[in-house]
Image: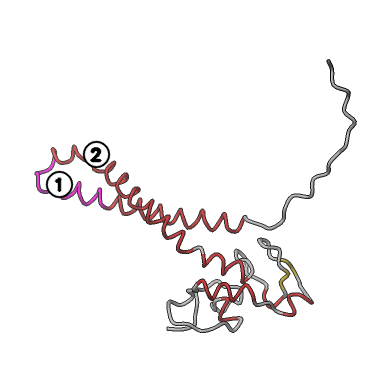
Amino acid sequence: MRGGGPVGFADGEGRSPWERLGGPPRAGHAGCMAPRDAVWLRARRCERCDSDPCTHCGRCGAAVCIEHLPARGLRCDACEAEWIDGGPTRRAVKHMFAPAAFILGGGAAFGALLPVVAILPAFLGALVVAAVATTVGVVAAAGTTGMVDGVARAQFLREHARTLPEARVIQRALPPPRR
């Protein structure tokens, strides 16, 4: 399946950045971009972006024309390509934290519901405790992966290329050293 990236890209038509700029088509998931495509995308510039910019990207500071103006919550095509490039890293972080959240959440629920086994018949009590503990673990793991995505996107959007102004060095005459 080619074309039709995720909804929310700057053009409003759901096309990914490499599709809008005429990048090389490739097989794979819709809206997915291989690192080689992202590198190609960063190298490509629109002439109007340089000659008639209407704004600058809030993250990298690159000039952007009205045609390539990113939608709210997005950055320029090169920055979005960088976000896509970071997907494997975010996925690895999720794989590290989700099992721990599952074990901690499920274990806490199991410990809290252990008295239920004494109240209900043995098989039914064990079934209820196991089902609730597993559900709590799955919800904890899902919440952790959602939190990783949310925090990573917030940090990505907060990044910017504007640096602090150049420091001014003030020369003062130092007093002579004391003996």
* Residue 111 falls within the magenta-colored stretch: no
- The front one of 5 and 131 is 5
Other-residue count near label 1 (Cα within 10 Å), few / some / many at <14 / 14–19 / ≥20: some
Q: Position of residue 174 (x, y in %)?
A: 87, 28
Q: Are marks 1 and 2 in contact (CB under 8 Å)?
A: no
Q: Which residue is mark 1?
A: 126
Image quadrant where residue 67 sits: bottom right
Toward the front, the furthest residue is 179
Q: Position of residue 122 (x, y in %)?
A: 9, 44
Toward the right, the furthest residue is 173
| Label at residue 111 | 2
For the point 30% across and 50% down, the residue is 137
Say if 78 sits above or below 156 in the image: below
In the image, which residues are magenta?
119-134
- The front one of 168 and 50 is 168
Which structural element holds mark 1? helix
Image quadrant where residue 93 sits: bottom left
Badge 1 or badge 2: first in the primary sequence: 2
For the point 79% across and 77% down, the residue is 51
Assign the N terminus to one quadrant of the image: bottom left
For the point 45% across and 63% down, the residue is 88
Residue type pointed to by label 1: Ala
